[in-house]
């Protein structure tokens, strides 16, 4: 009986190990100034596998990470970090997630996260962005298309 239990346990560990090993946590910095200008998430685009996590790091003060209405997969509740809060978010559901810094959305502080092998929903293009967020999202959308096309 003990031998069987041990065997089952060994089998269970063998099955669950690869899943544990492949889930990653990626760090994203929230910055006043980065390579692409002022008020940025760095990096501003991630392609993740379901189960991966993102740690949003408050490298500079007065930032947060929050989902943008209309830019989460259907039925996803979204999330909203507090200002200066370092949060870790696990992305289990495939789809695209538009992320903003609440106080600097108007200054274009946004990023895009792709989870799984999915195409950008057309509805994301109809979301109304503040003037300075719009060109950054257009560049991010173009990037996802290039990636899909294998460029
Ligand atoms: Cu900010």
Image: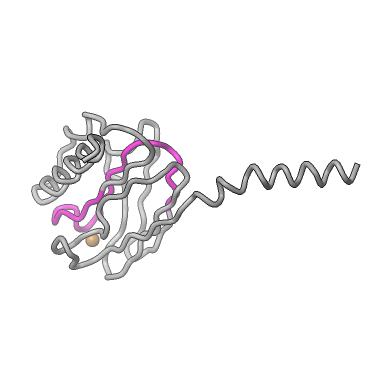
Q: Nearer the viewer, residue 28 or 22?
A: 22
Residue found 27% across the figure and 44% down from its top: 98
Stretch in magenta: 89-111
In magenta stretch: residue 95: yes
Residue found 46% across the figure and 41% down from its top: 92
Q: Nearer the viewer, residue 5 or 95?
A: 5
Judged from this view, the residue extending furthest toward the top is 122
Give the quadrant of residue 4.
top right
Residue 59 located left or right of residue 108: right
Q: Position of residue 147 (x, y in %)?
A: 24, 40
Residue 107 located left or right of residue 29: left
Judged from this view, the residue extending furthest toward the left is 131
Residue found 22% across the figure and 58% down from its top: 103
Image quarter where the C terminus lies is top left
Give the quadrant of residue 108.
bottom left
Looking at the picture, does residue 56 appear above or below residue 142?
below
Looking at the picture, does residue 30 appear above or below residue 53?
below
Residue 30 located left or right of residue 78: left
Looking at the picture, does residue 13 appear above or below residue 33?
above
Q: Position of residue 3 (x, y in %)?
A: 87, 45
Q: Position of residue 109 (x, y in %)?
A: 20, 55
> In terms of image quarters, where does ligand 1 lie?
bottom left
Residue found 14% across the figure and 46% down from its top: 139
């Amino acid at each position: 009986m003990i031998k069987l239990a041990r065997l089952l346990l060994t089998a269970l560990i063998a099955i669950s190990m690869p899943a544990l090993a492949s889930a990653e946590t990626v760090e994203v910095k929230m910055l006043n100034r980065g390579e692409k200008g002022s008020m940025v998430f760095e990096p501003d685009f991630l392609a993740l596998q379901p189960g991966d996590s993102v740690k949003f790091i408050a490298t500079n003060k007065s930032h947060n990470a929050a989902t943008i209405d209309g830019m989460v997969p259907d039925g996803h509740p979204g999330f909203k970090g507090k200002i200066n809060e370092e949060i870790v978010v696990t992305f289990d559901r495939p789809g695209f997630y538009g992320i903003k810094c609440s106080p600097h959305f108007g200054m274009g502080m946004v990023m895009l996260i792709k989870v799984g092998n999915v195409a950008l929903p057309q509805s994301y293009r109809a979301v109304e962005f503040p003037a300075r967020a719009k060109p950054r999202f257009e560049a991010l959308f173009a990037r996802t298309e290039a990636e899909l096309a294998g460029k």
